[in-house]
């Protein structure tokens, strides 16, 4: 076999390792229900859940409990299927958290009742999508 | 008044630029294909077209900047990206905050590059400028803002606010102009954001130059000649792009609070990948110049670089990344256009390469294991695989979009732990690259066989092992993979330093670019390994509070709560939060908010006391004080070791109405480490919810407790005048003086009680820092006591995260050396070109 072929085989082998590892390490988007089912089956892999913060009828965010030292907190989240879930995040409340239109939590169930987020991504009302113009200057 | 002239001028310039770029492309195409006799005319015509295009391109930029600079908020771009309070250098950042502005920046860079090429390289003018003009046509189309039926081509930055948003106010008054804009994203209000985007876009723009030479070379069948002019440009591009990446990393480090300089964010990856491929391409091109091999790989890599830049643009700007990135622009509906842009050049490049593939010379002979070609080729492959490993998972949203466009369902998400995921591969690739760059350099400068190689490498190897042992012992590097990193990096540093020494001794410094860049690489690796691998959070919460859940106690709380004035232990330091400060124009330090009272004007306050810094008075009491960005609060945190004061850090946060709290770190720089701190939560006392009333009846001289503050009532005083209140005859005003003690701080609170006839007025004293409001509820002459009504809120606090980043300076120093190496290499190639030109071999 020529060296060129050996190199080619080596490249293909590494590329396959890269692809397989990506598929293995890639997380998935789940609902709370499927995430819980995964936990029950003993899978501890971190997954993504997309949803919103729980809001009262008046539209106020409810269920945020900040621990006394302000370094961690609990909140209630409703996923896209409508399942309500208590979530713990071991970080201070992110700025603008209550204003988030959409929340993505990355993490897994700690036990049957509690989801622990390792990371939270928020989609905030962007200033670029602003459609109201303040009339204060009239 | 609405000024429509400037917008119309801008829009006209956009259309002119678009048309002239197509004319230029056509002209230069003709110039390339027509017989020698007619060339002169076509050249003059095409140049004129390109000059018109250049003037139009620059006019677009000037028009947009004028709109921002003159605060023309009737334009959507100025309204949504700028505000009156912005200093001029941040107006420049406003310019490229939006997608349209950054396209304009790119267009202007291409114009300048095109002008330079026309002047310097006349042999390649025709084919190269055809590619340039076509790229410009695509770029200008992104800001064209033309609607044909349902088809929208480009998004114009010159649209008026009333056309961009449908606010009811415009129905009442179409000429309404908002008083102020919504401002610049506070994260971009940083000096690095003024220079980072232009650098990055210059990097993007310059990848076009080698690509244009290559396409020109293929089209005109100059299969090998394109490498000579393309190489210095490729090196320049890699240098600028690398600098752009590093500036971005540095910006993230000093402005963002994710705790580092690199986060494997899709946008970062999207620039890193073309850079790796370009660096691989430079290596194969250099090999080709020396030994006529690796031409085909160079062609593939240069095409890939340019296409990956377009792909990066597509990823960042099409909205396909969605939530997975902090930087991504909002979707302007340009994704289709961006996709066509990328696919067009991909198709052209692949077509030309495929058509001419069999004519492209390649060497039939196998490269020997003891040849430099072999090792450089392996290095280029490693870089390519390194890039592949990053771009594949970064594109997960794209894979999902593709599956979904075929009606499938894909719920693949990016890896949950991005840093861990990428590091596990990139670390070993980087080690391989470091080793290859050490060995490869020996092959480069010497003829090698097995024996010669062994002899040449023994010394550097032994030295590297000794040096590594020192680093490992003193740096306490006990992780096996990090030990390998140290070995590989020191090996490349030592080996390349040896070569550098020999080169300087033997010949000129001009040839040293490669070894310098590789030394830089080794340093970067060591710096990254220490500062990221051994980055250590020291702000563990030690408040001793128990949590509602027992398991929470076992979690590391990586933030610490600092109450104002309360000393708190953070590793070997005692940290004390001392309150908020503002930046005042003309004052070198920061000024405590207690000295400032805000006025109705933007960025203005009144001094409540003399503002003194190091014995010099900058503003006197009562003067109006100009503030630099009044939304910015700097939290003063003093660090002590034992009793001894060490230093003060002022991490910043900005309360922004549109984005909420934005926090920027402040770091203490040591030679061997950084102490990196940022504020992760703050107290909001804009609108405090005061707790219920507490009453205290106290006689002068007595002491009582407001929560746990020892408070001394020093006595009452009858006032003859009060600031802001008109006292009449017969009015009685009494001021009580309370001294509240919080740790080592004494605060004086002076509530006022006014009696007018049988009415009573109370002016409370509020201290936001302590969260205390005191009012004189009544004066009890019979018992010689005052009755105070006290409300409490919480004391001011910050939640802080502090991280030690060891040896980060080795990283920065390494990047500088690497960039310097690139510059030396560029100079060498440019010098070569100049000499050839002077000899008349190339013109």
Image: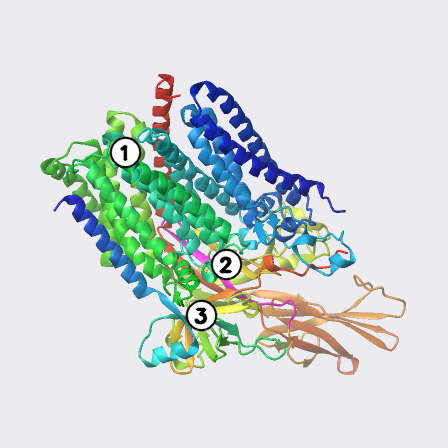
In which quadrant of the rendered view does residue B813 lie? top left
Where residue B213 sits: x, y (%)? 39, 33
**Does label 2 lie on the same chain as label 3?**
no
Q: On the rendered structure, is B733 left or right of A12?
A: right
Q: Nearer the viewer, residue B585 or B295?
A: B295
The residue most toward the top is B839
Question: In the image, which is nearer the foreground, mark 2 or mark 1?
Answer: 1
Which residue lies under the disc numbered 2?
B638
* Badge 1: residue crowd in 10 Å (few <14, some 14–19, many ≥20): few
Asked whether the residues under marks 2 and 1 belong to the same chain, the reply is yes
Label for residue B91? none
Q: CA distance from mark 3 to mark 1?
A: 55 Å
Q: Chain of mark 1?
A: B
Q: Residues within 10 Å of mark 3 (few under 14, many from 20)?
A: many
Query: What chain is tagged by disc 2?
Result: B
B361 part of magenta stretch: no
Q: Position of residue A46 (x, y in %)?
A: 36, 70
Residues rendered magenta in the picture: B670-688
Q: What residue is pinned by disc 3?
A: A105
Q: Is residue B58 above or below residue B831?
A: below
């Amino acid at each position: 076999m020529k060296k060129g072929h050996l190199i080619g085989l080596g490249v293909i082998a590494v590329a396959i390792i890269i692809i397989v590892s990506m598929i293995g390490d890639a997380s998935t988007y789940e609902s709370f229900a499927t995430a819980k089912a995964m936990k029950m089956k003993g899978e501890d892999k971190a997954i993504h859940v997309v949803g919103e913060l729980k809001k009262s009828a008046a539209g106020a965010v409810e269920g945020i409990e900040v621990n006394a030292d302000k370094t961690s907190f609990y909140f209630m989240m409703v996923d896209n299927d409508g399942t309500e879930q208590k979530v713990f995040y071991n970080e201070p409340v992110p700025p603008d958290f209550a204003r988030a239109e959409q929340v993505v939590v990355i993490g897994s169930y700690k036990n049957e009742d509690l989801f622990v987020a390792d990371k939270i991504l928020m989609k905030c009302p962007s200033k670029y999508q602003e459609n109201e113009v303040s009339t204060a200057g009239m | 008044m609405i000024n429509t002239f400037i917008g119309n001028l801008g829009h006209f310039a956009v259309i002119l630029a678009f048309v002239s770029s197509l004319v230029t492309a056509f002209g230069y195409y003709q110039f390339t294909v027509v017989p020698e006799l007619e060339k002169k005319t076509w050249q003059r015509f095409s140049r004129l077209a390109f000059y018109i295009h250049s003037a139009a391109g620059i006019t677009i930029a000037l028009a947009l900047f004028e709109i921002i600079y003159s605060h023309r908020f009737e334009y959507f771009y100025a309204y949504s990206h700028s505000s009156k309070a912005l200093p001029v250098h941040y107006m420049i950042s406003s310019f490229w905050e939006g997608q349209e502005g950054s396209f304009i920046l790119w267009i202007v860079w291409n114009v300048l590059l095109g002008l330079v090429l026309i002047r310097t390289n006349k042999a390649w003018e025709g084919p190269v400028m055809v590619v340039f003009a076509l790229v410009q046509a695509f770029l200008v189309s992104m800001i064209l803002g033309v609607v044909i039926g349902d088809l929208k081509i480009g998004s114009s930055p010159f649209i008026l606010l009333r056309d961009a948003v449908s606010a009811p106010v415009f129905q009442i008054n179409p000429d309404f102009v908002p008083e102020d804009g919504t401002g610049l994203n506070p994260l971009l209000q940083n000096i690095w954001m003024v220079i980072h985007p232009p650098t990055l876009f210059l990097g993007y723009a310059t990848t076009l130059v080698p690509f244009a030479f290559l396409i020109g070379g293929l089209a005109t069948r100059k299969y090998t000649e394109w490498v000579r002019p393309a190489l210095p440009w490729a090196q320049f591009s890699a240098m600028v792009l690398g600098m752009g990446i590093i500036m971005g990393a540095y910006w993230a480090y000093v402005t963002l609070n994710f705790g580092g300089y690199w986060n494997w964010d899709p946008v970062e990856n999207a620039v890193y990948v073309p850079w790796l491929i370009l660096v691989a391409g430079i290596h194969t091109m250099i090999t080709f110049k020396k030994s006529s091999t690796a031409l085909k790989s160079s062609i593939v890599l240069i095409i890939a670089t340019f296409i990956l830049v377009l792909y990066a643009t597509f990823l960042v700007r099409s909205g396909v990344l969605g939530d997975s990135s902090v930087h991504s622009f909002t979707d302007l509906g340009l994704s289709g256009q961006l996709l066509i842009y990328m696919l067009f050049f991909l198709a052209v490049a692949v077509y030309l390469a495929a058509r001419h593939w069999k004519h492209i010379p390649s060497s039939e002979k196998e490269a020997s294991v003891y040849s430099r070609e072999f090792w450089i080729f392996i290095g280029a492959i490693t870089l390519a695989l390194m890039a592949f490993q990053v771009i594949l998972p970064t594109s997960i949203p794209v894979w999902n979009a593709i599956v979904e466009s075929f009606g499938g369902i894909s719920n693949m998400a990016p890896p949950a732990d991005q840093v861990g995921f990428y590091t596990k591969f990139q670390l070993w690739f980087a080690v391989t690259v470091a080793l290859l760059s050490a060995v490869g350099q020996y092959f480069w400068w010497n003829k090698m066989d097995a024996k010669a190689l062994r002899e040449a490498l023994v010394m550097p190897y032994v030295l590297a092992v000794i040096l590594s042992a020192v680093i490992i012992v003193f740096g306490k590097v006990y992780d096996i993979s990090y030990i390998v990193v140290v070995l590989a990096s020191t090996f490349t540093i030592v080996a390349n330093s040896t070569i550098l020494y020999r080169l300087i001794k033997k010949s000129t410094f001009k040839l040293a670019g490669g070894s310098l860049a590789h030394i830089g690489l080794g340093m970067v690796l060591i710096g990254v390994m220490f500062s990221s691998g051994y980055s250590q959070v020291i702000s563990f919460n030690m408040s001793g509070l128990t949590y509602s859940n027992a398991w929470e106690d076992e979690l590391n709380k990586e933030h610490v709560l600092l109450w104002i004035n309360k000393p708190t232990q953070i590793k070997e330091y005692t940290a004390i939060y001392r309150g908020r400060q503002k930046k005042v124009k003309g004052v070198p330090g920061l000024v405590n908010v207690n000295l400032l009272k805000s006025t109705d004007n933007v960025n203005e306050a009144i001094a409540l006391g003399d503002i003194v810094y190091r014995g010099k008075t900058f503003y006197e009491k009562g003067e109006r004080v100009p503030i630099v960005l009044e939304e910015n609060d700097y939290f003063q945190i003093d660090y002590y070791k034992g009793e001894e004061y060490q230093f003060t850090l002022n991490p910043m946060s900005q309360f922004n109405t549109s984005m909420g709290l934005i926090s920027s770190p402040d770091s203490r720089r040591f030679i061997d480490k950084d102490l990196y701190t940022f504020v992760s939560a703050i107290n909001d006392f804009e609108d405090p919810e005061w707790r219920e009333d507490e009453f205290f009846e106290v006689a002068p001289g007595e002491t009582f407790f407001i929560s746990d503050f020892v408070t001394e009532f020093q006595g009452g005083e009858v006032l003859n005048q009060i600031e802001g209140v008109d006292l009449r005859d017969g009015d009685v005003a009494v001021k009580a003086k309370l001294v509240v003690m919080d740790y080592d701080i004494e605060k004086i609170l002076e509530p006022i009680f006014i009696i007018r006839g049988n009415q009573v007025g109370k002016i409370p004293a509020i201290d936001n820092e302590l969260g205390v409001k005191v009012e004189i509820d009544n004066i009890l002459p019979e018992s010689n006591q005052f009755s105070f009504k006290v409300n409490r809120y919480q004391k001011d606090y910050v939640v802080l995260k502090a991280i030690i980043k060891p040896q980060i300076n080795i990283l920065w120093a390494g990047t500088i050396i690497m960039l310097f190496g690139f510059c030396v290499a560029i100079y060498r190639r440019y010098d070569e070109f100049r000499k050839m030109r002077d000899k008349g071999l190339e013109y």
